[in-house]
Amino acid sequence: MRQRLLLVLLLFSLSAVTAFAFPLLMSTASERTQQFVISRTADMDRFATLPADAVVSEALRHTEIYGEEIVVVDAAGEPVVEAGMKVAEVSAQIDAALRNQPAAPVPTVLPWSGGDVLFARPVGTGTKVAGAVVMRASTRVAALDVARRWAFVLAGALLAACACVLLALVVARWLLRPLKELDRGVRAVAEGQRRTHVADTAGPAELRALSESFNRMSDAVAEAADQQRRLIADASHQLRNPMAALRLRVDMLPQNGSLLTEVERLESLLDGLLALASAESTATERAAGGVEPELADLQVVAHDRVDAWRAAAQAEGVTISVDDRAPGLVRCAVSDLAQVLDVLLDNAIKYGGSEITVVCDRATLTVRDNGAGLSEEDMERATERFWRGDDSQRGTGLGLAIADRIVTAHDGTLTLHTDGGLVVTVELPKEPLL
């Protein structure tokens, strides 16, 4: 953007300087040409009014001093004086002057002009021509004067162009510096800095107002993350105590089987909602500038959670194995990665068939089962909150939603597809091995 803005300002400035300098250059050349014509016309008028006995000596003297050749003829075209050139050389100009024809206009003298100009005029009145005067004048001196004047004009134009360039740089910096600060602030928030502020005292009023709005937004997002975190902690504390008391009372009731099942289901739903809220809080906190996530060893976490779920899997007649393909550290908290794997293993044991394989390949974790899998329509809805398949009566429908939100909060992706069973793939940001 800086380059585009500078390009526009410079093009405009140079166009303005050119639009001012070019007419001034041409006006200077035209003025000097007019002075040249007036001077030579005055000389010819003087020769035209001299008496016949004096014109010869004056013409020869003029040619000797100024180097300008002169021819004077009488009414019959016979030479009166030939100073430096012959009548035959300018016969056409002499004939035109004797017929009292107007002379051709003198072209504008430019710095590179170096030729001669022929001036011709009749001697006598308009009705009685007594002869003609022809002068060959050099434009060299006039061209040198034009060149000097043009040098002054171009020097001034160059100074003006330099001033315009400097002004363009100052204006561009004044306009773009607040934008650069805003870009730095946005990057800082994205990289995990809390309550990032940018300077709001530079630039035009609109950008200062935008900087103030960004600072308020940064504070508001950080405050919202803090409030969400406090809400989760308070809700967890306030809801678990009544649930524990309710469970104790239900345990004391005779024939409480169905009631106890509903209490357990309610506890499971509460745990799922709190886990989902916690995952969303993590995402909000990172967006607001939370702490940098810790690193987790994918293979270590996978083996730990598989060992923890092995007994539950055996009780359901399911075998679990781990396929270590390549080691890798991922940018994710160990507890969050363990929670994601718990959700995937729980679903696979409940609905996935008799065999589960956990594959660890650098920053990619894959949980594969040999069950019936899901249809295309079901896979599109599987990570929605409270969604459960038609044949899934157990669970709250929050597991995959929680896992997906945790993975997304850590800039990863969770995808599902069917390939001889359901395959869930989790890709997380990789930390290079040293």
Image (cartoon, helix red, strand yellow):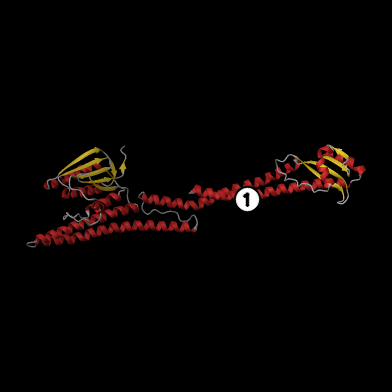
Q: Is residue 434 left or right of residue 346?
A: right
Q: Residue at x 39, y 53 (%)?
A: 196
| Callout 1 amino acid | Ala
As rendered, which of 224 and 417 lies closer to the eye? 417
Q: Say if 411 sits above or below 140 in the image.
A: below
Q: Indicate the position of residue 433 as horizontal and vertical percent values.
A: 30, 38
Decide if residue 67 is in sight here. no
Label 1, residues with CA under 10 Å away: few <14, some 14-19, many ≥20: few
Residue found farthest to the left = 254
Q: Indicate the position of residue 246 as horizontal and vertical percent values.
A: 14, 62
Q: Is residue 258 left or right of residue 361?
A: left
Q: Say if 19 sits above or below 88 in the image.
A: below
- Based on the displayed image, in which of its 4 quarters is residue 141 positioned? top right
As rendered, which of 368 and 253 lies closer to the eye? 368
Q: Indicate the position of residue 257 as horizontal and vertical percent values.
A: 9, 59
Decide if residue 259 is in sight here. yes
As rendered, which of 400 and 48 lies closer to the eye? 48
Secondary structure type for disc 1: helix
| Label 1 sits on residue | 19
Q: Indicate the position of residue 85 as horizontal and vertical percent values.
A: 83, 37
- Based on the displayed image, in which of its 4 quarters is residue 425 positioned? top left
Quadrant of the rendering where the C terminus is positioned: top left
